[in-house]
Amino acid sequence: MSLYNNFIGVDIGKFNFTVAVYGNNNVGINSFVEDYKPLLSNALSILETTGGYEMELLFTLHKEGFAVHRANTNKVKNFIRSFGNTAKTDSLDAKALALYGFERVELLELFVPQSKKALELYELVQRKNDLKQMLIAEKNRLKAPKADLIKNSCQLMIKVITEQIESIVLKINALIKDDTILIARKKLLISIPGIGNIVANELLILLPELGLLNRRQIASLAGLAPKNNDSGKFTGYRRTGQGRNLVKPLLFLAAMAARNSNSELKLFYLSLINRGKKKMVALTALMRKIIVIANAKLRDLLTKKLEIKI
């Protein structure tokens, strides 16, 4: 028997979300909670990951004590395709999410933020990465021959954007230092070769599921689980799929650093190279090993805290 009497699918857009149509802002979110409160108390709400637009509603539902699942976009799309229905509207997507929750309820983990500051931290990381893209664009513009006025403008923008990024990094560090749980989790992450302060910060913020899933689930969420491609006697090339936005680039940086470190992770990478693996394949395997180790360390931390409470 299901734990829930109702399943509520919510299709999130930039400016609104659809159950009935609510504005994707404080007023709309509060109206949704109030209108659906009789159902939410014994319901599972399913929200699709949509570039961060779902985060405020996600945190609000959790704060109010309602069960909510943050669904993997690719899994939901494949689920919808399985019905052979190619039509797409916000209303149909919301219904599909509700049906997805109903059919997969026993396999869906509930969203659990790791910090009271999780939403603010998430928005800061998103803004930091937006600014990094702007910085790359300005640096590329500066390379081309330009009039002095244009060059000066590019240099000024580079200076301003760099200062903004540094300010956001300081704010992220300050918020993490004020949270004992995040401090403990970050300390464990930094103990892994290749993971420094910035990568640790962003993994904590972008992958709050670290320590709550098994090794296969966390690798899949990060987009690093190899997918079989076999049929009969044919054995195809394994490829990794898409994962949580912005996580793979972080793990790539960690793997590059671990590859150059004096650690067992470097030996693991070299052993793959010596066995004839391509460098990118070996790096991908190293990325997967790093996230699996991180997940195990944070899972052990969580287990110890539960034992202490008991």
Image (cartoon, grey):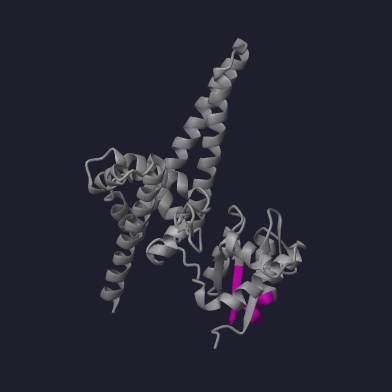
Q: Quadrant of the C terminus?
A: bottom left
Measuring 54% from the left and 74% from the top, which residue is drawn there? 67
The image shows residue 183 at horizontal and vertical percentages of 33, 55
Does residue 169 appear in this view? yes
The image shows residue 46 at horizontal and vertical percentages of 60, 69
The image shows residue 131 at horizontal and vertical percentages of 54, 37
Magenta includes 10? no
Span highlighted in magenta in the image: 36-46
Tally of numbered tags: 0
Measuring 35% from the left and 58% from the top, which residue is drawn there? 292
Outermost residue on the bottom side: it is 1
The image shows residue 110 at horizontal and vertical percentages of 50, 71
Q: Is residue 232 left or right of residue 100?
A: left
Residue nearer the viewer, 220 or 110: 220
Magenta includes 41? yes
Outermost residue on the front side: it is 233
Measuring 69% from the left and 63% from the top, which residue is drawn there? 28
Residue nearer the viewer, 114 or 214: 214
Does residue 115 appear in this view? no
Which image quadrant is residue 75 in? bottom right
Q: Is residue 255 left or right of residue 136?
A: left
Seen in the picture, residue 206 relative to 91 is either above or below; the reply is above
Measuring 47% from the left and 50% from the top, which residue is drawn there? 247
Residue nearer the viewer, 260 or 8: 260
Outermost residue on the top side: it is 148
Q: Quadrant of the N terminus?
A: bottom right
Q: Is residue 165 left or right of residue 93?
A: left
Seen in the picture, residue 120 relative to 44 is either above or below; the reply is above
